[in-house]
Image (cartoon, rainbow, N blue to C red):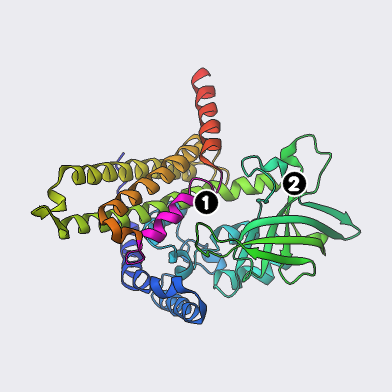
Amino acid sequence: MLFPVPDRIRKVRDEVHAFMTERVEPAEPVLNAGGEESRDALLRLRGEAKEAGLWALGHPAGLGGGGLPFLDYVYVNEVQGRSEWGQLALGTFTLQDSLMLHQYASPRWRERYLAPMVQGEVSPSFAMTEPDVAGSDPTGLRTTAELDGDHWVIRGRKWFTTGAAQAAYTTVMCRTEPDAASPHRAFSMIIVPTDTPGYRIVRETPVLGLHGGHYEVAYEDVRVPADNLLGPRGHGFVIAQERLGPGRIFHCMRWLGQAQRAFELMCARLDSRVAFGGPLSAKQLMQQHVFDSYTQIQAARLLTLQAAEQIDAGDLSLGQGARIEIGAIKVVGARMLHDVIDRAVQVHGAAGLTDDTPLSRMYRHAREARLYDGPDEVHIQSTARRILRKMAS
């Protein structure tokens, strides 16, 4: 299976690639610096994306988006992933939240948030992990929500709530069914507007020295109406899995975009850098870096597209038939991303450790990939178990 880019999507994919390389990537130094100038630059890019017809391509047309089918958007997502700013500049950062809201929220919340979110006028945030609970076992989450009359009262603490300081609301995973027979039926998701009394941002938590907008948030007797419940009671993990299945495909495709960019930088450096009487590209050890990176990228791309095709052919939300493939690509993709960027840093020598290239920042983000959406160890264990059950049947 070659999985070539389909002709029907090639034009828009090329347009997104050009937008990334010609507009977003050159703007990264300003975007990374933060502050008012960064905000202005991002707003300018968003306006340009809308004018070019490249805004919110993966969102359903009925919600005001570009309406690309899932598998078509997967191909676009790879080139969009060349920069960490791609999702924000092109209006796709909110895709998972808008789909979740559209499917499970009450009419009141869909009317309030959906259209503005797709247009980039408001942003969401998602709160699941907690500082004192092993993220590898989310059934241990301690944040609770108790029904008091017609209001939920939420108590607890979450962290790594990305974008909480700018978000209009946070979707919070809470323990609402303490007597549930299954620990996976003990949790629900509840919408909490960020201006609700008791919603308190404790701090921003830099990750490997980067301020990426990840926040620790305390929920101190937060009261929200009962209809802020997202979906049925006790269905928090069901909704989370529907969010995470396609989401992991999107992660892996963006990682491929990052790795491809690092690979291009590495090859250009090998051709331009002269040492010991010739270009680095003539050295066999450097050629090994090229070979290893190329094969890792290609293998990860094929695995990811295979998983995406299986999801697209079956249950798009749950991806039940693709659980093995999704678990595999999460681990393989994260390792590939780290390894390729690491080699690119090595080839650049001292320059690779500085901010003279994007590699230093990319390298630090790559290390995150082996932890978020579940650590490698959990995916390896669960995927191996599924393979063994399948082989024994």
SS for callout 1: helix
Percent coordinates x, y for residue 370 in the rendering? 49, 45
Identify residue for label 1.
247
Q: Quadrant of residue 362?
A: bottom left
Looking at the image, which residue sits at the far left?
A: 277
**The label number, if any, that marks residue 274 in the structure image:** none
Please tell me which of labels 1 and 2 falls first in the chain: 2
Q: What is the secondary structure assignment of the residue under circle 2?
A: strand
Residue under label 2: 187
Which residue sits at x=32%, y=46%?
297
In the displayed structure image, the side of residue 134 where residue 144 appears, left or right: right
Disc 1 marks a residue whose amino acid type is Gly
As measured in the structure, the alpha-carbon distance from the residue carrying label 1 to the one carrying label 2 is: 20 Å
Identify the residue at horizontal 50%, vertical 62% (top origin): 210
Q: Amino acid at mark 2?
A: Phe
Q: Which residues are magenta?
A: 354-374
Q: Which of the image's four quarters has the N terminus? A: top left
Drawn side of residue 32 relative to residue 153, left or right? left
Residue 370 in the magenta stretch? The answer is: yes
Q: Is residue 258 above or below residue 320?
A: below
Q: Is residue 113 magenta?
A: no
Rendered residue at 40%/63% (across/down)? 83
Work out whether residue 81 can be spotted. no
Q: Residues within 10 Å of mark 1 (few under 14, many from 20)?
A: some
